[in-house]
Structure formats: C-alpha cells, structure tokens
Image (cartoon, rainbow, N blue to C red):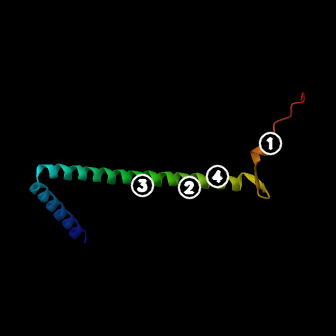
Amino acid sequence: MIEKTLAGAVAALCIVFMLRLLVGARRRAALDAWARLAWLRLKHGWLQLYHWRSSRKSAERLAEEAIRRARDDGHWEGNVYKPKSFSKRPPRDKMH
C-alpha cells in the first residue's frame, strides 16, 4: 500500500516537472511562484497547528493544576473558595 502511494506521488511529481519544462518562461515563473507560495502556506499552517496544540496542552495543564490546588489547598464555604493562605492573617497594628 505504501509503495503504491509513494510510486503514485513520484509519478505525479514527474508529470508536473515535465509540464513545467514544456510551458514558456513566463508561465514557468508563475508556476514556480505559485508553488513557493503554496509551500510556504502549507509550512506556516503546520507550524500554527503545532503552536496551537502546544499552547492548548499548556492551558490544559495549568487548568488541571488550578483545579488540584482548589481541591486540596483550601476549603469551600458555599460557593466561595478560601485558600489556607488567606486564613493566616498578619498581626494587627496596635497603633491604628
């Protein structure tokens, strides 16, 4: 299956290159510019997809960490979360 797919892709590439040789210089330049633009768009699209996935994984990891902290580090009074660090108040200033 892979061999047939690879052979078909190589044959298609050979046909494109043969057609490129048969067309005139102006059309060849236009075809080359189109191919470069298509390649850059494809490459840029894959990079965006990679960055989107990595930022999504990072956001998921941060959300899971926040949920874990909320579950473990404090207590809930109704729908209000109070971390343990809020219950430790600094001593009041006796002057005021």
- Place residue 71 in its image quadrant: bottom right
Residue 95, picture quadrant: top right
> Which residue matches tag 4?
66
Q: Nearer the viewer, residue 6 or 25?
A: 25
Q: Which residue is mark 1?
A: 88
Q: Looking at the image, which residue sits at the far top?
A: 95
Ranked by sequence position, the earlier of labels 2 and 3 is: 3
Please state which of the two labelled residues, at mark 1 or mark 3, is closer to the viewer: 3
Residue 3 place in picture, x, y as percent: 21, 68
Looking at the rendered structure, the secondary structure element under dot 1 is loop
Describe residue 50's horizontal placement relative to residue 32 as left or right: right
Q: Residue at x 9, y 57 (%)?
A: 22
N-term-proximal mark, 4 vs 2 = 2
Q: Can you give x and y, in whole percent of width and height, for residue 51 in the image? A: 44, 50
Secondary structure type for disc 2: helix
Residue ID for mark 3: 49
Q: Residue furthest left?
A: 22
Per the model, the C-alpha gap separating discs 1 and 3 is 45 Å
Task: State which tag comes first along the sequence, 2 or 1.
Answer: 2
Dot 1 or dot 3: first in sequence order is 3
